[in-house]
Image: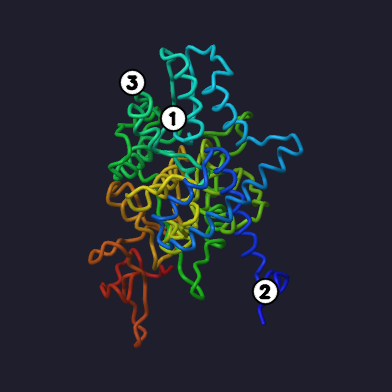
Amino acid sequence: MPRSTEEILNALKPDVIRRYHNLVSVCIKHIRSAQLTQKMLLERSKVLSHKARADRFARAVWLLALAYSHKLDEAKRIDFEGMIGNAVSLIENGRYPSPFKLILVDEFQDISEPRANLIKALRAQKPFTKVFAVGDDWQSIYRFAGSDITLFTQFEQQFGASWIGRLQQTYRCNQLIAGVAADFVQRNPGQMRKSVQSVRAQIPRSIRVIPVKVEWEKPSMDNACQQLLTRLNSFAAKIAPKWQTDAKPKLSVLVLSRYNMQNPFKGHPPVFSHIEVRSMTFHRAKGLEADYTVLLDVSEGNFGVPSRIEDDELLQLVIPFPETYPYAEERRLFYVALTRASRGVFLLTNQVRRSRYIDELMEIGGDNVSLESVDGQPLEPCPACHKGHLVLRSAKNGSKFMGCSEYPVCRHTANVSENVEGQSI
C-alpha cells in the first residue's frame, strides 16, 4: 500500500526537509529576480547530469514560484527580487525616464545578472551614460547568491568599450602575505592580472603552518587553537610596549573556519588579557582585518579547504554555471581568508591530510612559509616527499628515530639530531 504524504514527511529527517526548503527558497528567489520563465528552466534542465530529476524539479519549483508571486500580489506586497525585476520592466517599457548620466557601482565582483540588467536598461535609455564600477574579481565568492564573475572579467563584452584601472596597493596585510596570496590566486588563469604592493613592510615567516596530530581519527583543532591563542597572548604581553596604547589595548585575532560548525567557540570566544578574539567563517570575514588570523582545519576532505561539498546540481537551474577551473571559487575564498591578517597568519592543518593549498603556499613562499608545532617549535620538512615533516618516533627496541608524518605513504627516516632530541608532537 502506498504511503500517505504524512507518513513520507514523518520518515524524512528534519535536516533533509530543511535542505529542501532552502533549495526551493533560493530557486524561487532567483526565478523572480532574473525573471526566468518555465521554458528557461526546462532548457537548463536538459544539460544537467540527472535530466529527469532536474526536469521534475524545474516543473515543481516553477509552480511554487507562481504560487508565491500570487500570494504577494494578493497581499499587495513586494520582495527585493520583485523590486529589481519590476524596475527593469518599468525602464525597458519607458515608464521610468532615467535622469542618470553616471552610474557608480561598488563591490562589482558580487553583481548578478538581474542587477547587471538594471544597469543595462538605464544605459539603453541614455546611450552616453557612463558606468564606473569598482571591485576585485579575486574576492568574488558569492556565486550561491547569484553573482556572476564573468560580468566582471568580461566587462567590455557586457558594457562596451571601457578603461580598466588597477588599484594595486593594499593597506591590510604585510608584503609577504600580500605577495604570496596574489601569486596563489593568480594560478587560476581566469583571474585578472595584478601586481600587489603593500604599505606594510614584509614580515619574514609571517605565514605559519601548524600540523595538528590526529587523535581518534579526528584532528584536535579546538585544543590546538586554544593552545595557539594562549601562546599568542603571551607573545603579545611580552612585546606590549611596542604596540599597546590607550586606543589599542589589545591585539586583534580572527579565528576563521570554512563552515560554521567548525567554530570552536560556539559564539563565545575566550577572553585574554592582551588579545581580542573573534571567530567566524571565511565568507563573513570578507572586508575585515586583524593583527593575526588563525585558519582552522586547512586540510583535505569534504569539509576541508578546498571544500569538496558541492551545491545541489539543481541550483544550476537558476544560478550561473560553475567555472571550468577546478575549485575556482574555493581558491578565491581561501585568498580572502589568507589576506585578513596584517602581522601574521597561522594555518592549522590535519597532520596527515594537509591541504593542497598549503603545498602551493610553501612552493610560492619558500622559507617564508614556515612549519612549526603549536607551541612554536620549528619542524623540519621531509626531504624525501616534501609534503610531510619529520616527527620523533620510537622503534620496537625502544630507540628513537625521525620519521615522516606522511607515513606509511612516505617511509623516510633519519637519525635524531641534538636539536630535536626530546621533542615530539
Q: Are marks 1 and 2 in contact (CB under 8 Å)?
A: no
- Colour approach in the figure: rainbow
Packing grade of label 1 (10 A; few <14, some 14-19, many >=20) is some
Place of residue 305 in the rendered image (x, y in percent of width and height, measured from the top left): 43, 56
Q: Which residue is mark 1?
A: 135
Q: Earlier in the sequence, mark 1 or mark 2?
A: 2
Q: Amino acid at mark 1?
A: Gly
* Quadrant for the C terminus in the image: bottom left
Give the number of the disc on residue 11.
2
Place of residue 52 in the rendered image (x, y in percent of width and height, measured from the top left): 46, 63
Q: Earlier in the sequence, mark 3 or mark 2?
A: 2
Packing grade of label 2 (10 A; few <14, some 14-19, many >=20) is few
**Vertical position of residue 233 compared to residue 128: above or below:** below
Q: Residue at x 51, y 76 (%)?
A: 216
**Residue 280 shows in this picture:** no
Q: Amino acid at mark 2?
A: Ala
**Vertical position of residue 264 compared to residue 110: above or below:** below
Q: Residue at x 48, y 24 (%)?
A: 119
Q: Which residue is mark 3?
A: 162
